[in-house]
């Protein structure tokens, strides 16, 4: 048995120490060498057993390998990593947790399959009637002289004639749902899971006022004679033709308004601030204080791009986001940890893939029972 075979079997058994893990990775990541043909054959044999590698796993492999050999890995083409392709396959299937785990690290215990969320919502009309919306629907609803078009995961309001309808509509996404709505003034709103937006079917007053719970991204149609305002909890955001994100979930400690383009004025009680692009206003719910800081836009807008992005994020925050998107209950048996996580993964992935990624980058383990995710001690 070769040294590689010994390390390979030891890693699968979870008996390697940190130096032995590095040694194994060094062998796999060599560009040339007498072991390469044997490594290729061994790993390709396992790949042929059904462990297919998805295209978006290349980035994951790069991040894993850069932790040990960053300079050299950046110079390598992916074809030089073919010998390590099984890492991606095993990571994607949850068969093993590779190269980031501690000795003796065990698999997540999972049962069943919990799929990712998708385009679905409930539209509540002015008369109280409810309409179920999803990604496959295509319909036209009439509300006075307002036509409401639903096509796939988008809702659009169109005004016909000069008379204005009255009343409010509410678009609500459940856990595991998201939806886009184009308001009567042309403003586009992307609504994240477990959120709701209340708005008039026609903006007729001196201002365009909507009310948000949860999270949404806005691209506001400019109209200086009719300011656009978003009411959320104890905060009001006044907009001047702009793109911004508001996160105001009930289980979060702060309401966050993040400006991408344009300008917004944030007001809470006696405090107010004018944001510049790239800034985030945080209203602490308990203290009522308003603070301004530079925002991590890639993290804030990740959900709109179909991603989970974790940049120095604690597990409790991550699990709240997972609970909303996968419509699961989180049971924490491990207590509050200090470990911070980094990385990204598609929101289209099965829940098991996300949990396996978290396991590979940390010390926590998870178990799925029905629609419950248990963080194990």
Image: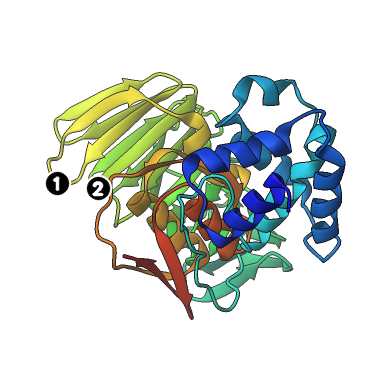
Asked if residue 120 lies left or right of residue 19, the reply is right
Based on the displayed image, in which of its 4 quarters is residue 196 positioned?
bottom left
In the picture shown, does residue 368 fall above or below 197?
below
What's the residue at 61%, 24% (across, down)? 70
Residue 308 x/y as whole percent: 53, 47
What's the residue at 74%, 52% (across, down)? 86
Between 3 and 351, the one nearer to me in the picture: 3
The secondary element bearing badge 2 is classed as: loop
Query: Mark 2 = which residue?
Result: 253
Asked if residue 202 lies left or right of residue 336, the reply is right
Q: Mark 1 to mark 2: distance in Å?
A: 8 Å
Q: How many marks?
A: 2
Residue 179 x/y as whole percent: 58, 56
Residue 279, visible in the rendered structure? yes
Between 304 and 318, the one nearer to me in the picture: 318
The secondary element bearing badge 1 is classed as: loop
What's the residue at 69%, 64% (across, down)? 135
Residue 128 x/y as whole percent: 45, 74
Between 230 and 225, the one nearer to me in the picture: 230
Q: Earlier in the sequence, mark 1 or mark 2?
A: 2
Task: Give neighbour class at mark 2: few <14, some 14-19, many 20+ (Cα, 10 Å).
Answer: some
Based on the displayed image, in which of its 4 quarters is residue 228 positioned?
top left
Residue 164 x/y as whole percent: 54, 52
Task: Give neighbour class at mark 1: few <14, some 14-19, many 20+ (Cα, 10 Å).
Answer: few
Asked if residue 32 lies left or right of residue 190, the reply is right
Name the image colouring: rainbow
What's the residue at 48%, 55% (across, down)? 359
Q: Are marks 1 and 2 in contact (CB under 8 Å)?
A: yes
* Quarter of the C terminus within the rendering: bottom left
Query: Mark 1 = which residue?
Result: 286
* Quarter of the N terminus within the rendering: bottom right
Residue 171, visible in the rendered structure? no
């Amino acid at each position: 048995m070769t040294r590689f075979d010994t390390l390979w079997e030891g890693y699968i058994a979870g008996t390697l120490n940190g130096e032995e893990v590095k040694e194994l990775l060094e062998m796999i990541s060599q560009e040339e060498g007498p072991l390469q043909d044997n490594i290729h054959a061994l790993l390709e044999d396992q790949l042929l057993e059904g462990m297919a590698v998805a295209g978006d796993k290349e980035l994951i492999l790069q991040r894993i390998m850069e932790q040990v050999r960053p300079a050299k890995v950046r110079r390598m083409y992916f074809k030089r990593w073919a010998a390590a392709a099984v890492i991606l396959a095993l990571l994607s299937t949850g068969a093993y947790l590779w190269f980031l785990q501690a000795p003796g690290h065990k698999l997540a215990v999972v049962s069943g399959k919990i799929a990712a969320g998708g385009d679905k919502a409930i539209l509540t009309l002015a008369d109280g009637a409810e309409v179920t919306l999803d990604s496959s629907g295509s319909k036209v609803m009439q509300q006075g002289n307002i036509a409401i078009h639903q096509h796939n995961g988008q809702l659009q309001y169109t005004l016909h004639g000069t008379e204005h309808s009255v009343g409010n509509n509410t678009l609500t996404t459940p856990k595991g749902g998201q939806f886009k709505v184009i308001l009567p003034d042309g403003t586009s709103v992307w609504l994240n899971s477990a959120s709701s937006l209340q708005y008039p079917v026609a903006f007729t007053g001196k201002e365009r006022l909507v009310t948000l719970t949860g999270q949404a991204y806005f691209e506001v149609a400019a109209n200086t004679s009719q300011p656009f305002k978003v009411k959320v909890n104890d905060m009001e955001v006044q907009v001047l033709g702009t793109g911004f994100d508001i996160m105001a979930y009930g289980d979060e400690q702060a309401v966050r308004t993040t400006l991408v383009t344009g300008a917004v004025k944030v007001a809470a009680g006696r405090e107010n601030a004018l944001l510049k692009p790239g800034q985030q206003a945080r209203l602490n719910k308990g203290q009522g204080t308003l603070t301004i800081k530079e925002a991590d836009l890639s993290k804030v807008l990740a959900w709109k791009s179909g991603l989970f992005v974790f940049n120095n994020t604690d597990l409790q925050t991550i699990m709240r986001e997972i609970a909303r998107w996968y419509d699961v209950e989180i049971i924490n048996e491990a207590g509050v940890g200090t470990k911070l996580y980094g990385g990204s993964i598609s929101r289209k992935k099965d829940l098991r893939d996300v949990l396996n990624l978290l396991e590979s980058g940390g010390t926590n383990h998870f178990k799925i029972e029905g629609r419950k995710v248990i963080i194990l001690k």
